[in-house]
Image (cartoon, rainbow, N blue to C red):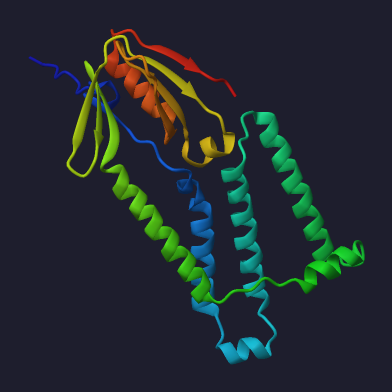
């Protein structure tokens, strides 16, 4: 006589008891610059020559490449933080401009006779920094990231099946809002920020609360929205998603 054992439900079907929402500052989008600085620091540490030898060699080509790489990534990162790219068309235009600029740079460097003036100007510029500079950049930005992470441990929102909780302060101050008939607006106002960390804005409208709760820079916002929708289930959830 055979018996069948019921299959264990998948984790995706398991009930969700709570969803934690955290609003992050924009500096978290500097992680590509952090990685670029780390690569440049490791390269300079592992392949760097003594200061006297480097000065006699009038800058190492590899160091110049690292300098260009770091400055390009940092510049693009700062553009992302400074401006919003709300539509895919703006993203395409930006990438086209960057691609044209990089193509001109490669042609000027690899084929100096094609664009002699531009090639001479680029060859004359060798942005070089020693490993100490990059390590200082990496350590300072890393400490800022760590401080931001610690701050989010004391200021976050928690969505439960029947209430919305706001935890804030060193002493774990708590505000409660009723969750039934919770209305959610999801907005993706910057394509770059969404590509970097899946970031977007969540606007929560709690019942019997006149003021909307706006959470900027919620990471992996699509997953958070899906979890809230699954958890609230039979409760009324209104979702508006700005299509890109």
Work out which quarter of the rendered image holds the C terminus and state it.
top right
User: Which residue shows up at 57% across the image and 20% down it?
Assistant: 243
Residue furthest toward the front?
A: 210
Q: Quadrant of residue 191?
A: top right
Say left or right for 151 vs 6. Answer: right
Query: Where does residue 86 sit, x and y in percent of width and height?
Result: 61, 30
Query: Where does residue 144 sit, x and y in percent of width and height?
Result: 40, 56
Work out which quarter of the rendered image holds the N terminus and state it.
top left
User: Which residue shows up at 52% across the image and 52% down it?
Assistant: 32
Say left or right for 240 vs 244. Answer: left
Can you say whether 115 is above or below 21 in the image? below
Query: Where does residue 200 sit, x and y in percent of width and height?
Result: 48, 31
User: Which residue shows up at 78% across the image and 59% down it?
Assistant: 105
Q: Quadrant of residue 93?
A: top right
Say left or right for 136 vs 64. Answer: left
Looking at the image, how many numbered discs can be counted on the residues?
Answer: 0
User: Which residue shows up at 75% across the image and 54% down it?
Assistant: 102
Query: Where does residue 137 sit, x and y in percent of width and height?
Result: 49, 65
Can you say whether 194 is above or below 6 in the image? below
Residue furthest toward the left?
A: 1
Can you say whether 206 is above or below 149 in the image? above
Q: Quadrant of residue 165?
A: top left
Q: Nearer the viewer, residue 136 or 154?
A: 154
């Amino acid at each position: 006589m055979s018996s069948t054992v019921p299959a264990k439900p998948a984790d995706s079907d398991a009930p969700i008891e709570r969803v934690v929402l955290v609003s992050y500052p924009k500096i978290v989008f500097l992680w590509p610059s952090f990685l670029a600085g780390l690569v440049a620091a490791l390269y300079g540490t592992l392949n760097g020559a003594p200061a006297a030898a480097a000065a006699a060699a009038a800058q190492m080509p590899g160091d110049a490449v690292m300098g260009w790489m770091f400055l390009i990534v940092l510049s693009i990162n700062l553009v992302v933080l400074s401006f919003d790219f709300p539509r895919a068309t703006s993203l395409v235009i930006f990438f086209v401009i960057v691609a044209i600029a990089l193509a001109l740079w490669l042609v000027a460097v690899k084929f100096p006779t094609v664009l002699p003036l531009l090639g001479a100007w680029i060859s004359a510029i060798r942005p070089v920094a020693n490993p100490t500079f990059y390590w200082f950049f990496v350590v300072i930005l890393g400490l800022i990231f760590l401080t931001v992470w610690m701050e989010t441990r004391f200021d976050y929102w928690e969505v439960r099946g029947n209430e919305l909780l706001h935890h804030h302060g060193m002493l774990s101050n708590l505000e409660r809002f009723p969750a039934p008939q919770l209305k959610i607006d999801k907005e993706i106002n910057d394509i770059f920020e969404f590509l970097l960390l899946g970031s977007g804005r969540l606007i929560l409208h709690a019942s019997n609360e006149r003021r909307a709760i706006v959470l900027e820079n919620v990471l992996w916002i699509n997953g958070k929205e899906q979890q809230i929708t699954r958890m609230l289930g039979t409760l009324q959830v209104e979702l508006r998603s700005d299509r890109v």
